[in-house]
Amino acid sequence: MTAFDPRALRDAFGAFATGVTVVTSRTAEGAPIGFTANSFASVSLDPPLLLICLAKTSRNYANMTGAPAFAVNILAEDQKDVSNTFAKPVEDRFAAVEWRDGPAGSPVFPGAAAWFDCTAERIVDAGDHAILIGRVAGFENSGRNGLGYVRGGYFTPSLETKAQRAAADGETRVSAVVERDGEILLVPAGDGRFALPGAVLGNRDGLDALKADVRARTGIAMTGGYLFSVFEDRSGGFQTIVYRAGADEGAPRDGRFFPLDALPLDRLASPQTADILRRFVSERALGNFGVYFGNETAGRVHALAGKA
Ligand SMILES: Cc1cc2nc3c(=O)[nH]c(=O)nc-3n(C[C@H](O)[C@H](O)[C@H](O)COP(=O)(O)O)c2cc1C
């Protein structure tokens, strides 16, 4: 038998982009239980079957595999928090979400992109997981866009399209949280303050413009690049798009790398930058990066959706 490095295998499996679901059921005593799963697959239309894979290490393993029914809730783009709650050892996971009983008795989330309430059809033993096959007893499809997950981070396809459209509408500033070996690149912003390296977009593509301007200013070549935050600065009347990226070797010509635990949070050009860096540090610790949409002080998706 070939023994692979489990971490490397998991990372390679993670190249497959999926949605995110919360699988729910009830204990024999009737208490609601649930956990986050991206191992969902639709299986058959006739009869209507689906599957999810459950780790044998789950605290819910006995309850889930012993239950006569379970439901699969496909999370919507604005339900990243729900995904995180159902993946962490939270006392009452169900306090984080609006839910009700589905037709077969398991908790379903009206705010989800879709849900399927199932009776347990079959359990297949599969290594360190069990495959739970469910027969759909009822479902609802809200038409909301689903939250995405790839390589350990969430993505929000339709919100990202909206951000690009909003960017085309007005002045857009792009900047990046550039991380290399646990340190973040910041550039001087006057008065002893620091800012994220950035660019004014003009008619250029966000990430290309950013990479060109960061390289011109600091000599540092950014690598990769994922959307991290999009917000509208209502005081200044512009959109800000923040990416997260890596960096090649070399010392910056302008600016410097600060360790994650020694960021100059009290010497930044704007309070939003401090918020962005705090969020980066905490999401990096969790290994789960999300995308924030809103205005500079509050909100999530709606400020931007309203504008686009
Ligand atoms: C995006 C994402 C997808 C996950 N997919 C699965 C999965 O398919 N199967 C699984 O058993 N655990 C999966 N997990 C991990 C469980 O959600 C996590 O281990 C949870 O804490 C289990 O809780 P429990 O022990 O209370 O059941 C996933 C976690 C995340 C964040």
Image (spheres, rainbow, N blue to C red):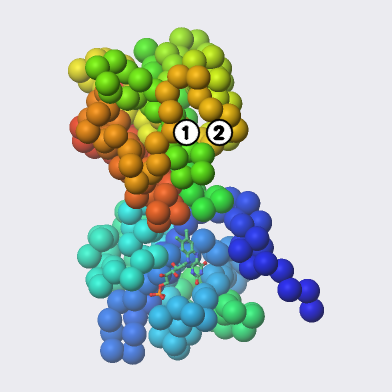
Q: Nearer the viewer, residue 237 or 288?
A: 288
Residue 139 seen in the figure: no
Secondary structure state at the residue bearing disc 2: strand
* Residue 231 at x, y percent in the picture: 32, 28
Specify which label sits upstream in the sequence, 1 or 2: 1
Q: Is residue 9 left or right of residue 219?
A: right
Residue 131 seen in the figure: yes
Circle 2 packing at 10 Å, graded few (<14), some (14-19), many (20+), is some
Q: Which quarter of the figure has residue 82?
A: bottom left
* Residue 171 at x, y percent in the picture: 37, 12
Secondary structure state at the residue bearing disc 1: strand
Q: Which residue is mark 1?
A: 178
Q: Determine which of the numbered discs, if any, sits on residue 247 in the image.
A: 2
| Disc 2 residue type (three-letter) | Ala
Q: Is residue 36 left or right of residue 293?
A: right
Q: Is residue 239 above or below residue 249?
A: above
Q: Are marks 1 and 2 in contact (CB under 8 Å)?
A: yes
* Residue 146 at x, y percent in the picture: 45, 48
